[in-house]
């Protein structure tokens, strides 16, 4: 094919918008994005472009090529492409290059005469030949307070680190990873129980509002004058997640495990092994995915030994540093997510122990 029940306090930190464009001709904007969170931003941009006083129009959409998904591995369009098609966007204006540096794609892009390109979790490296095309530049919505957490998994790495504040940045795209001048940003206080998919949705929703607010200054060029260079000495990296990271050991502190569960929610998830001791005393290793957890702040028992307990609809797992991890929801291989109570009832009196393999 070608061409959110959690409350977060928000603190706005951005520069004033530039003056409205005096031209009656709408500017051509090209959108680049791939996953579902990108589709939510595209939705808001399309709505804004249809307003009677809009200064821009969506000239094209660029997204990742179709990929094999679900059990049959049938080739399916990216969530952004599917959203665009479902909403009547012309199919010949949906581009799916394998690489953004392909000459055929770049030629098609030049023919559209884009004034500005906007990237939202596109997932493809943009070469200099691409960046030279739009006169107003290319800007990116990045879900962190740059220069913190540059890279593919900023929200996940921030949650894994247990941050209490993060945010979203609008920045110009340069060849160096997420290192361009910052046009605007907004801070968000992080709830201790929010998971990565929820926080991603919140940040990209704020980011889309921030981008739309800043578009006049970006398109008239004044944003380039006010944009602030990043302090590279304060930069931290947020590398892509891997499936190997999903395993946890209960020999870690409960807080570290809880943060990892929040960070890896969705994909790849957080897996652990426990032992089920049957009525004859025989141990069997059981793998589970931890879905919803908390750190027990009112546990009055010392976290000693390896036995996993059950209290008030939660599994209580002893962890390092005399800490306890509460597991409220879990998932067994091939099964649906279940409550800790349903899982415990299914044990039918068998004991549950920490596994030496976890």
Image (cartoon, helix red, strand yellow):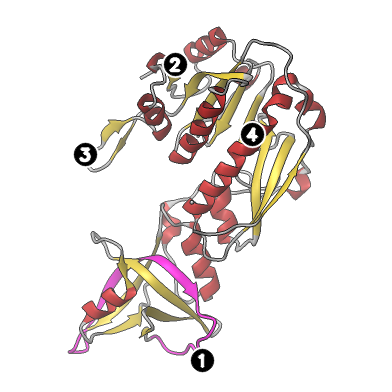
Q: What is the secondary structure assignment of the residue under circle 4?
A: helix
- Answer whether labels 2 and 1 touch (C-beta < 8 Å): no
Say left or right for 143 vs 351.
right
Mark sitting on residue 176: none
Q: Quadrant of residue 206?
A: top right
Q: Point out the tag, 2 or 4, that comes first from the N-terminus.
A: 2
- What percent of the width, then of the height, locates residue 154? 58, 48
Whether 145 is drawn above or below 72: the answer is below
Residue position for label 2: 93
Q: Position of residue 181 (x, y in %)?
A: 74, 34
Q: In the structure shown, which secondary structural element does the residue marked by tag 1 occupy?
A: loop
Q: Which residues are magenta?
A: 278-306
Q: Residues within 10 Å of mark 2 (few under 14, many from 20)?
A: many
Q: Which of label 3 and label 4 is nearer to you?
A: 4
Q: Position of residue 293 (x, y in %)?
A: 45, 70
Q: Of the numbered discs in the image, which one, if any, rests on residue 211?
A: 4
Q: In the rendered image, which quarter contains the C terminus? A: bottom left
Secondary structure at badge 3 equals: loop
Residue 329 higher or lower than 267, as above or below: below
Mark 1 vs 4, N-terminal side: 4
Label 1 and label 3: CA atoms lie apart by 50 Å
Identify the residue position indicated by label 3 in the image.
72
CA distance separating discs 2 and 3: 28 Å
Residue 301 among magenta residues: yes
Q: Residue at x 44, y 39 (%)?
A: 36
Q: Is residue 177 among the parts visible in the rendering?
A: no
Please name which of the two marks, 2 or 3, marks the residue nearer to the observer: 2
Q: Circle 1 is placed at which residue position?
A: 300
Q: Disc 1 versus disc 4: distance between alpha carbons?
A: 49 Å
Q: Residue furthest top?
A: 111
In the image, 127 versus 119, the foreground residue is: 119
């Amino acid at each position: 094919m070608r061409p959110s029940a959690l409350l977060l306090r928000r603190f706005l930190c951005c520069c004033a918008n530039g003056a409205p464009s005096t031209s009656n001709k709408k500017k051509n904007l090209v959108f680049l994005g791939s996953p579902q969170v990108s589709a939510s931003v595209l939705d808001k941009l399309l709505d804004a472009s249809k307003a009677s006083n809009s200064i821009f129009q969506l000239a094209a959409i660029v997204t990742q090529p179709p990929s094999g998904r679900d059990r049959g591995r049938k080739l399916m369009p990216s969530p952004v492409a599917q959203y665009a098609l479902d909403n009547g966007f012309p199919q010949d204006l949906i581009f799916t290059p394998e690489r953004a540096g392909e000459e055929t794609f770049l030629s098609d892009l030049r023919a559209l005469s884009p004034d500005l390109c906007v990237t939202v979790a596109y997932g493809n490296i943009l070469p200099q030949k691409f960046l030279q095309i739009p006169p107003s530049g290319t800007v990116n919505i990045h879900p962190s307070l740059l220069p913190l957490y540059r890279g593919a998994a900023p929200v996940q790495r921030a949650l894994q680190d247990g941050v209490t504040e993060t945010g979203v940045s609008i920045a110009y795209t340069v060849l160096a990873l997420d290192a361009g001048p910052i046009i605007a940003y907004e801070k968000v206080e992080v709830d201790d129980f929010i998971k990565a998919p929820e926080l991603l949705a919140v940040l990209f929703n704020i980011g889309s509002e921030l981008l739309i607010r800043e578009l006049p200054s970006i398109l008239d060029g004044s944003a380039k004058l006010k944009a602030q260079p990043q302090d590279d000495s304060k930069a931290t990296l947020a590398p892509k997640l891997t499936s190997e990271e999903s395993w946890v050991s209960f020999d870690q502190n409960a807080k570290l495990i809880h943060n990892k569960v929040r960070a890896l929610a969705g994909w790849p998830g957080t897996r652990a092994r426990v032992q089920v001791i049957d009525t004859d005393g025989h141990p069997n290793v059981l793998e589970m995915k931890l879905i919803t957890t908390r750190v027990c702040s009112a546990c009055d028992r010392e976290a000693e030994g390896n036995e996993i307990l059950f209290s008030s609809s939660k599994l209580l797992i002893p962890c390092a540093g005399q800490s306890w991890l509460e597991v409220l929801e879990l998932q067994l291989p091939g099964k649906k997510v279940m409550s800790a109570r349903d899982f415990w009832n299914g044990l039918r009196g068998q004991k549950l122990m920490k596994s030496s393999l976890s």
